[in-house]
Structure formats: C-alpha cells, structure tokens
Amino acid sequence: MSAEFGDRGPQSKLSRWLRGRRPQEATGDGGREALLLAAASAGLPLAPAAYPAPGYRCSCDRVGCPTPAQHPVSFAWQTQSTTDHAQIERWARNQPQANFITATGMVHDVLDVPLEAGREALGRLLDAGIDVGPVAESDAGRMLFFTLTRGTPEDEDEWWPCELDCHPETMDEHPGLRWHCRGSYVLVPPARLTGDDQHVRWVRGPEHPLPDPLTLLEVLTDVGTRHADQETGPAQPAWPSRR
C-alpha cells in the first residue's frame, strides 16, 4: 500500500482511499479456503459460524437471533477453535456457506472500533510509522485491529482488567472501542453479513505480524473519543485500569 500519508484528519488521502476502496476478496471455494488457511497460518484459531439466510435471517433459525450470521455454530467454540489446516479444510468443504469466527485471547486480541474512527486511526498510525498488523473492516460499521493477546497469566492477580473488554454478551455495552480478549470472538474474513452485499473483508491481510496492542491503543482511543464527542458531546475517555 503506497498511498501518501502526509495529510492528517478524517479527510486524509488514506481515509479517502479507504472510503472508496473495496478490497478484493478471493472468490469461489478455493479462494475462501485459501483466505481461511492464511488466517490459520498466522495463528488465528478458527471455528465455523452461522451465515445469512433468506429474508435477513440467520442460518441458526433462532427466532430473533441477536447477532444473525455473526456467532459460532457450536457452544463449544472455544475448545473447537483450531489452526489445523486439515480440520479447517473439512469444515469449509462440508459447510460451504458458513462464516468463520476466530477466538480471541489465545494468540491474539482484537481492538474493534467504529469504522470511520478506525479509518482515521489507521492513517495516523501508518503516518507515524507504527507497525500495524492485520486489519479488517465490516459493512456493519466496524474496523478490527488484530494484535497480540495480553495473555493468560498463571496468577490471576496479574491479569490486567480493562473496562473496554468485550465479550459476546456485552457487545451492546461497548458502542465505542471494544477490546476482544479471553472469552470473545470476531468474524474472520471472508464473511457475509445479513443484508445485500454486506461483508467482512481484509484491509491489511494476516501476513502482517501481530503488534503489541498498547502500540495502537493511544491513537485508537484518542480518535474514537473525538468521534464520539462529535456525535454525542464530550465524554470521559475510557482507559484500561491496572490493579
């Protein structure tokens, strides 16, 4: 990606480029498998997920599904998630319409921000020469920054609790910056959402090394807070808190 990054702010050259760009996803079963296997090769553990059904419904057929086409198929998704290529190929071929989720908090976390804030933050990060790892964007209005995980220390007193931590059941409580870590998941590209031509796609693919989340957090929080202020008025920025 060789865009110039001299302009700053929401109308930077990168922001305009991202706004009009629809990153090309591989098509067909072979292309889908290749993208899933590339994610697995990068260490992202995968498991099958629901997919869109006719009439803006979810394939799980649950009446009033709260996250149609965006949740795992199995309740055992945390133990089922794997990077094993043979298993992922079997799932992809036996469930050709399925989306896939990647379980966070094992190898990687995901910093999940509103799309416009994410696009501006990505431009600022690249302009500053900060290493940015894989990044995906969702037509549901979110941008996903994949990072190394904070880990799972043996001593729980060493765990770094964060008010931004996001789990599947608390998604609605985090309209701004969400930090997916232990016990959470996100859709991994390529994925289809309910609605016409709605997808989750890579902006920067999984070949980019996972960065430390703290190298991205300040910019993501700063930009996200400013965007939230513009929409709802001044708000107290949310920062992680240590014990």
Image: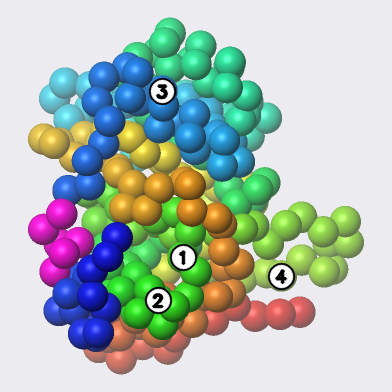
Q: The residue tagged with tag 1: helix, strand or loop?
A: loop
**Residue drawn at (32%, 34%) of the image:** 191
Q: Quadrant of the N terminus?
A: bottom left
- The residue type indicated by label 2 comes to Leu
**Residue drawn at (42%, 68%) of the image:** 177
Of all residues, the one furthest to the right in this rendering is 155
Lower position in the chain sequence, tag 2 or tag 1? 2
Tell me, yes or no, whether the two marked residues, 2 and 1, touch with CB atoms within 8 Å.
Answer: yes
Which residue in the protein does label 1 denote?
A: 132
Q: Position of residue 241 (x, y in %)?
A: 65, 80
* Span of residues in magenta: 16-21
Numbered label attached to residue 43: none
Q: The residue tagged with tag 3: helix, strand or loop?
A: helix
User: Is residue 145 found left or right of 76 in the rendered image?
Assistant: left
**Residue drawn at (47%, 46%) of the image:** 206
Residue 62: tell me if it is visible. no
